[in-house]
Image (cartoon, rainbow, N blue to C red):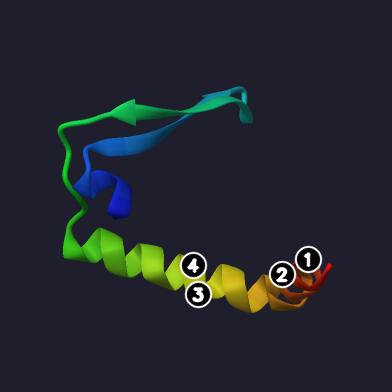
Amino acid sequence: MILHTFGWAIVTEIDEGKIIDVYPARVKFRGFGEENNTEGYVKVSQFLKDNVNELLTEAED
C-alpha cells in the first residue's frame, strides 16, 4: 500500500512456476479494493502464524 501511494509496485516475472526476475516499476494504479486488502491481511496473518518461530530465530541471529 505504501508503494502504491507513491506510484510504485513490485513486478514479479514468473516462468513455468519459477520466479525469474523481480523489480520495481512506476504505475498509475493507487491501491486495492477493500475485499482484496482484507484477503491480503488474512494471508499475511496466516503466514506470520505459520512462520513465527523461524522469523524470531532469524531476528535474534
For the C terminus, the quadrant is bottom right
Mark 2 in CB contact with mark 1 (< 8 angstroms)? yes
- Name the quadrant containing residue 15: top right
- Name the quadrant containing residue 24: top left
Residue identifier under label 4: 44
Q: Residue type at mark 3?
A: Ser
Residue 11 drawn at (x, y percent): 42, 31
Q: Residue type at mark 1?
A: Glu
Residue identifier under label 3: 45
Number of the label disc, if any, that sits on residue 3:
none
- Name the quadrant containing residue 46: bottom right
User: Real-space Cα distance between discs 4 and 2?
Assistant: 13 Å
Q: Is residue 35 left or right of residue 23?
A: left
Element carrying mark 2? helix
Residue 1 drawn at (x, y percent): 29, 55
Element carrying mark 1? helix
Q: Is residue 28 left or right of residue 22?
A: left
User: Real-space Cα distance between discs 3 and 1?
Assistant: 18 Å
Mark 4 in CB contact with mark 2 (< 8 angstroms)? no
Residue identifier under label 1: 58
Q: Residue type at mark 4?
A: Val
Residue identifier under label 2: 55
The tag earlier along the polypeptide, 3 or 1, is: 3
Mark 4 in CB contact with mark 3 (< 8 angstroms)? yes
Q: Residue furthest front?
A: 61
Q: Nearer the viewer, mark 4 or mark 2?
A: 2
Disc 2 crowd, CA 10 A, few/some/many (<14, 14-19, 20+): few
Tag count in the figure? 4
